[in-house]
Amino acid sequence: MNWFVLRSGLRLLKRAIARETYRYLTQPVTVPTITDLRPLRQSENLTLTAAANHLRVWPAVISNLERGTRRDDQLAQAYREWLHAA
């Protein structure tokens, strides 16, 4: 393979990666809110343990999710749906 062709291909690849990276760095990402989970659980008089048992996770996982130290959108959605149904 010609050195010039290889070098041109690498340059195009680097530019494509730089464009994608720049786009991700400059556009804000919307993150689903989790501030409603703990008050909703408390208003239903449910414990962390009860929620954890229903969702089959450790209570610490639910606590971390409610405090925002752990992000798991699928778990948060399942948790929210369960709380609204309770």
Image (spheres, helix red, strand yellow):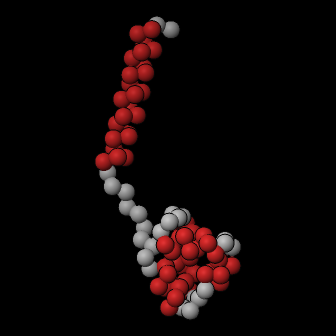
Seen from this angle, which residue lies furthest left?
26
Q: Nearer the viewer, residue 4 or 47?
A: 47
Q: How many marks?
A: 0
For the point 34% across and 36% down, the residue is: 19
For the point 42% across and 15% down, the residue is: 7
For the point 60% across and 70% down, the residue is: 61
In the picture shown, does residue 63 fall above or below 46?
Answer: above
Figure quadrant of residue 18: top left
Figure quadrant of residue 6: top left
**In the displayed structure image, the side of residue 56 where residue 82 appears, left or right:** left
In the picture shown, does residue 44 fall above or below 34?
Answer: below
For the point 33% across and 41% down, the residue is: 22
Q: Is residue 67 visible?
A: yes
Q: Where in the figure is residue 78, as x and y percent of width and height?
A: 57, 73
Q: Quadrant of the C terminus?
A: bottom right
Q: Nearer the viewer, residue 59 or 12?
A: 59
Q: Where in the figure is residue 84, as x and y percent of width and height?
A: 52, 85
Q: Where in the figure is residue 26, as x and y percent of width and height?
A: 30, 48
Q: Where in the figure is residue 76, as x and y percent of width and height?
A: 53, 71
Q: Is residue 54 visible?
A: no
In the picture shown, does residue 30 fall above or below 79?
Answer: above
